[in-house]
Image (spheres, coloured by chain):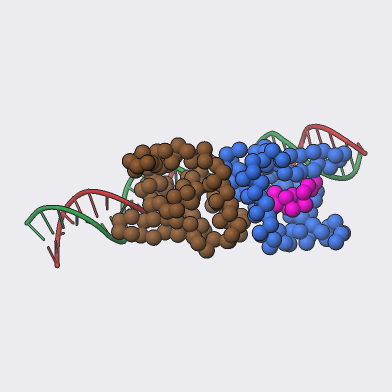
Chain colours: A blue, B brown, C green, D red
DNA sequence: TTCATATATATAATTTTCCATATATATGAA
DNA sequence: TTCATATATATGGAAAATTATATATATGAA
């Protein structure tokens, strides 16, 4: 994975937020992201497909749902970049996480 | 600096290479980057202007030359991301650094 | 059939690039 | 010093390329 392909894939609000939310929650299904980000299903799905195509995320179908998580084969630098960004920017995801938790009726 | 603005600014080959070269060499002038990257002067200048506009780089004129270096006011996570990417991807800049050293007639 | 997700196509918006030109500094001659 | 020229860098504007979006439709599991 070349740095430029990696950063191009992060350079969209929907993709970056999806990635950081998935990093925080370990794995999420498409419908979780749709409700957290409050975006249309095709939009979320298309951006997840991009993250899948450049092998940042992997997907796994379990019944009706498709779950996305980080690709464990990512190079170390990419894992570190995602982790650092997610941990040190809580405010960037704050509202999305609140909304997600409300929609899950939990916490 | 929001993560999305930061990553949008990295998501171009000219900008990313310029940034990583500057990170490696501490500071470089525009003409150094033009010869290292083998790109037109307006192209390099325009991309440096973007990195300046989003406050990732700062510039300083010294005589005829304008030097660019990292903005020390960058948030920690951004500094870490740049450092990690630069250090763990030597091959991404390899040819550019060789070409730069040849043009400088050094090392 | 319904629910969850993916994808195709057309359109819109954004970004990049190129060429020309502008600006700022340095240098050399008169 | 002044004027002309050279060098380094920046920027305006148009065209080209890339990317994102909405809507409609397709697929796959229950």
- Dominant secondary-structure state across the stretch colored magenta: helix
In front of the other: D29 or B80: B80
Quadrant location of the C terminus of chain A in the rendered image: bottom right
In the rendering, at what x and y percent does residue A31 appear?
80, 48
- A105 w.r.t. B37: above or below: below
In front of the other: B14 or B20: B20
- B23 w.r.t. A4: above or below: below
In front of the other: B8 or D14: B8
Q: Which residue is drawn at 58% across and 61% down?
A: B75
Image side of residue A94 versus residue B6, left or right: right
Q: Residue at x 76, y 43 (%)?
A: A68
Task: Let me know if residue A28 is in the magenta part.
Answer: yes
In the rendering, at what x and y percent does residue A10 appear?
63, 48
Q: Residue at x 37, y 41 (%)?
A: B107
Task: Let me know if residue A14 is in the magenta part.
Answer: no
Q: Can residue B40 be seen in this view?
A: no
Q: What stretch is highlighted in magenta?
A: A18-29
In the rendering, at what x and y percent does residue B47 appear?
46, 50
Image side of residue B46 versus residue B8, left or right: left
In the rendering, at what x and y percent does residue C17 appear?
44, 42
Q: Is residue A58 visible?
A: yes
Q: Which residue is drawn at 64% across and 43% down?
A: A76
Image side of residue D4 versus residue A85, left or right: left
């Amino acid at each position: 994975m070349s740095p430029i392909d990696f950063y191009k894939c992060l350079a969209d609000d929907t993709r970056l937020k999806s990635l950081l939310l998935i990093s925080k929650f370990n794995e999420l299904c498409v419908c979780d992201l749709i409700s957290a980000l409050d975006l249309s299903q095709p939009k979320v799905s298309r951006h997840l497909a991009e993250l899948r195509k450049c092998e940042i995320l992997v997907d796994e179908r379990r019944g009706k749902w498709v779950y996305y998580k980080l690709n464990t084969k990512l190079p170390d630098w990419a894992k570190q970049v995602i982790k650092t960004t997610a941990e040190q920017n809580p405010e960037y995801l704050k509202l999305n996480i609140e909304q997600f938790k409300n929609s899950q009726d939990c916490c």
